[in-house]
Amino acid sequence: MLCRTHLIGLIALSSLLACSRRPPPPPPPPAPAAPKAEIKQGEQHFANLAQITYGGENAEAYWSFDGTKLVFQSRPAGQSCDQIFSLTLGDEGSLRRISTGLGATTCSYFLPGDQEIIYASTHLGGAGCPPRPDHSQGYVWPLYASYDIFKTSAAGGPPVPLTNTPGYDAEATVCPVDGSILFTSVRDGDLELYRMDKDGQNVVRLTSTPGYDGGGFFNRDCTKIVWRASRPTGDALADYQRLLAQGLVRPTKLELYVANADGSDAQQVTYLDAASFAPYWFPNRNRIIFSSNYGDPQGREFELWAIDADGTDLERITFSPGFDGFPMFSPDGSRLAFSSNRATAEGAHDTNVFVVGWLDGILEGQAPADRVMRDVSWLADPQRGGRGTGTAGLAEARDWLGTRFAEIGLAPAGSQGFLQPFEVTTKVTSGPATSLTLGGEKVPLTPLSGSVSGEASGRLVFAGYGIVDEKSGIDDYRGVDAKNKIVVVRRFVPKTVTGEDARRLGDLYYKGFVARRQGAAGLIVVDAPEPSAKGDALPDEAPFPPLLADGLGDSGLPAAIISRAAGTPLIERLLRRSRVQGTLKIDLVPEKATASNVVGRLAATGPSDGGVIVVGAHYDHLGLGGPSSLAPGIQAPHLGADDT
């Protein structure tokens, strides 16, 4: 049957009513325009995308052996059952229906020479469409017992049965060398793969493991086969067998397998824990392209992927929302036919056939060093603003990382896709209740970044520089009973401590940790160096450290710093063993924001012993700088190219 449109659709002509007295009804509102079919960002193997069908459900488009035609199944809009059609690429008038128009059909394929086509059909079981499956048991596929495999002329004509056994016979594909047929059948009580001659004779069973073995294809020289299979165990196996008895199968967990053409030496290729199907061999190498919902927690987004037959080098091929599936290379490997709803109007449910030029290998500019440089350049771009916590630049980096994870073949492993949101403190201010009272008098103070909010009351004791360090031979708490007291310590370190030790032991967080370990209730720091024996002038007082969100509460006790003017007399009183009582109150007001870890999972390429390898890195940086920066006085984006 010829068709003058791009689409497998029939134009119904109606006669005009010449004498109607009623005005014609208003035209229906136009349907939403379908988006233009286009190659999506990241689809680096694609060139010159062409849409072949326009509307309805069109899928499983397979090439003729001369690479000029496609045969596929289609359910035009308004129709109930799929039928088999063929067309010559570039010839819009070549579209013709191959099947009878009765029953349901699936899985068509040219035989070598391109003069005959095989397909599966239910028409001998009834002219109407078989009943739809009962989805009250979840998402299931029907296994119509009336499906048999037929052969017909490529121009259409009476179908000749190749199988005639009770139960499901379908999913047939063809060896390009001798025309033998690989198919799926339930004839022995389970869904297994079989091979038969092109005339239906000499049927040989190839698989024997419980589970759904189907959708098989030969490689180019027919020495290997690839297929998708489920391998349920325990309760899942019982569920599989229960559904199979009803003529149903649940296709939610399917992995790819390869074997010799006789079924021997079967090996599992993927371990994606997803619905992976429609595998097809690359014409020029031992690699497989397939469709999978791997990476989508909802299981609804299907993309094309590629993987070597030994289970290595998993690569995502498509990046289009919705469905991309049923890939098949042209015989010369220069083009790829596949089915997609990338050009489906909003609210519609069309799936169409596309053909795209295939660019194999690594594209120019895709060398690993170039890729790494592009990634680092993007993250360290000044537009990211240094990727400080809680900033727009960090959010941009978060979203970019999720996209890159998907592009390199990782599956989401966060609580929200790739993201694992958590609350983070971005800023801290001192609240109105913050105060220090010594002997009934108020003393100005600034909370330290490691402080907690809270109150410490009691006697004050002095503990030198607040250092306990065996390496340096310093124990400022020797002979000091700090338990439940407010400890007063000097800022920085003694002159005898230098280099890295000075940085480590002078850190204010460190002084807080030591005070807490000694049982202190609170900590007061004073920039009051020990007087020189020679009476030398003291160095100028250092500025107070800013109150930062980083490390909030890490010291585990209320902690503050006071001025040298207020602190020096206090230290002198404590050195004279004067009894000083005080109350330290710290009221910290945090500002919160939501940040996210970006978490991906790379499936094992072989059987796993249950272990997990965790690789971590941080994508945040210093923002506009600050005390943690090597240039704390510069308020500018700290790009972090060496820390990405």
Image (cartoon, helix red, strand yellow):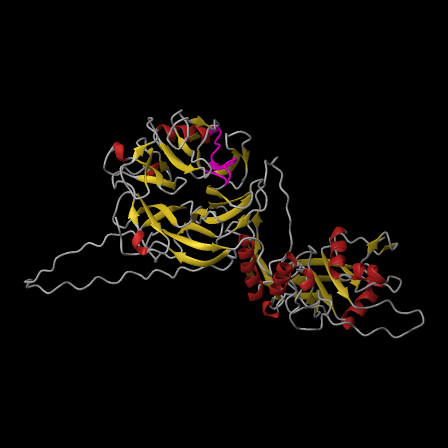
Residue name at image x 71 percent, y 66 percent:
629
Q: Nearer the viewer, residue 335 or 377?
A: 335
Residues in magenta, as a range: 217-235
Residue name at image x 24 percent, y 52 percent:
10
The x, y position of residue 23, in whole percent, is 10, 65
Viewer can see residue 321: no
Classify residue 371 by image quadrant. Answer: bottom right
Residue name at image x 88 percent, y 54 percent:
473
Relative height, residue 183 to residue 628 (above, below): above
Q: Nearer the viewer, residue 478 or 145?
A: 145
The x, y position of residue 54, in whole percent, is 33, 55
Relative height, residue 30 to residue 98 (above, below): below
Apparent side of residue 570 relative to residue 388 in the rendered image (left or right): right
Relative height, residue 514 to residue 130 (above, below): below
On whether residue 231 falls in the magenta region, the answer is yes
The x, y position of residue 271, in whole percent, is 54, 39
Position of the C terminus by quadrant: bottom right
Q: Nearer the viewer, residue 71 or 339?
A: 71
Residue name at image x 80 percent, y 59 percent:
505
Q: How many marks?
A: 0
Q: Nearer the viewer, residue 281 or 420?
A: 281
